[in-house]
Image (cartoon, rainbow, N blue to C red):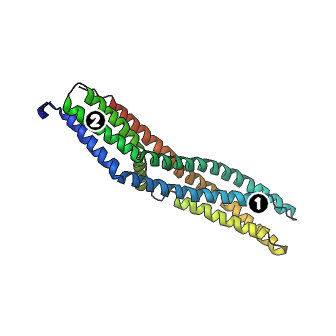
């Protein structure tokens, strides 16, 4: 067929194919998405480690036997709700970390050279069909190419969209709350060191430290909930929403009529 017979939309398909092919082999999108997921995984791991450290300290303190009955009663009364909150926090953080690990592994899979080779082969086949005839093979091959391209780029695009939302709308959304958790962890370490001490000094210090922990418990819970919400939003909820949006967009493109 002559170039004059080519529809403008066919030129659009081919230009899109060339652009996607260039992105696949260049790999910049994959590297940017991979760096963001890796950084998010490190941050989530640090937060999870803080939570597990609090959980370990609380468990150790709850299992400590003291000669002061009233103080022992206060330990149990104070640490039970802390332990409950941190165990639930750790469980949800496990979900967030798992989501990031899955994203990282899937990104490695879809950025493998196999997908780029498949895209290249489909692009060549589409180009041949485009020049040979307009019997319907070109639109069919182009849609197959778009399906493979969706599998190749969807996750990276979702991660980059998440990166954009994080940088524009959620800057430093977890730092202050994590500092509250770390401060609370430090307070628990002080209590643990005092509990392992001896004599009257321990009795006098424990009373003040328990009062301080009780006063900061509400701040700790509030910070933990805010931190949990920020991590879940960035690692689970936003990626799922963007993936759904990309999926719907791909469905609309594939349902476009061939003529």
> Is 258 left or right of 107, judged from the image as shown?
left
Residue 53 in the image, given as x and y percentages of width and height: 67, 60
Residue 208 shows in this picture: no
Relative to the observer, which residue lies in front, 120 or 195? 120
Identify the residue position indicated by label 1 in the image: 60
Q: Which residue is drawn at 75% across and 70% down?
A: 193
Q: What element carries label 2?
A: helix
> Is 81 left or right of 104, judged from the image as shown?
right
Residue 109 in the image, given as x and y percentages of width and height: 46, 46
Relative to the observer, which residue lies in front, 75 or 208? 75
Circle 2 or circle 1, nearest the eye: 2
Identify the residue position indicated by label 2 in the image: 125
Identify the image quadrant of residue 227.
bottom right
* Up-down relation of residue 150 to residue 83 (above or below): above
Count of marks, rendered view: 2
* Up-down relation of residue 47 to residue 107 (above or below): below
Residue 155 in the image, given as x and y percentages of width and height: 43, 44
């Amino acid at each position: 067929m002559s170039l004059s017979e080519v529809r403008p939309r066919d030129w659009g398909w081919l230009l899109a194919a060339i652009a996607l092919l260039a992105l696949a082999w260049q790999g910049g999108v994959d590297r940017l998405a991979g760096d963001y997921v890796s950084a998010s995984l490190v941050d989530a791991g640090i937060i999870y480690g803080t939570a597990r450290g609090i959980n370990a300290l609380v468990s150790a303190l709850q299992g400590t036997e003291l000669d002061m009955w009233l103080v022992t009663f206060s330990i149990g009364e104070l640490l039970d709700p802390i332990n409950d909150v941190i165990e639930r926090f750790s469980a949800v953080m496990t979900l967030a970390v798992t989501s990031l690990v899955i994203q990282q592994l899937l990104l490695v899979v879809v950025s493998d050279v196999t997908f780029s080779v498949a895209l290249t082969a489909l692009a060549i086949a589409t180009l041949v069909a485009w020049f040979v005839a307009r019997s319907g093979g070109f639109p069919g091959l182009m849609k197959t190419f778009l399906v493979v391209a969706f599998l190749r780029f969807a996750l990276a695009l979702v991660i980059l969209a998440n990166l954009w939302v994080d940088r524009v709308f959620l800057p430093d959304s977890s730092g202050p709350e994590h500092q509250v958790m770390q401060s609370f962890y430090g307070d628990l370490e002080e209590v643990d060191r005092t509990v392992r001490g001896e004599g009257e000094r321990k009795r006098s210090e424990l009373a003040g430290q328990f009062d301080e922990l009780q006063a900061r418990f509400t701040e700790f819970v509030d910070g933990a909930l805010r931190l949990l919400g920020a991590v879940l939003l960035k690692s689970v909820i936003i990626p799922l929403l963007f993936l759904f949006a990309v999926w719907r967009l791909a469905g609309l493109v594939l349902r476009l009529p061939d003529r």
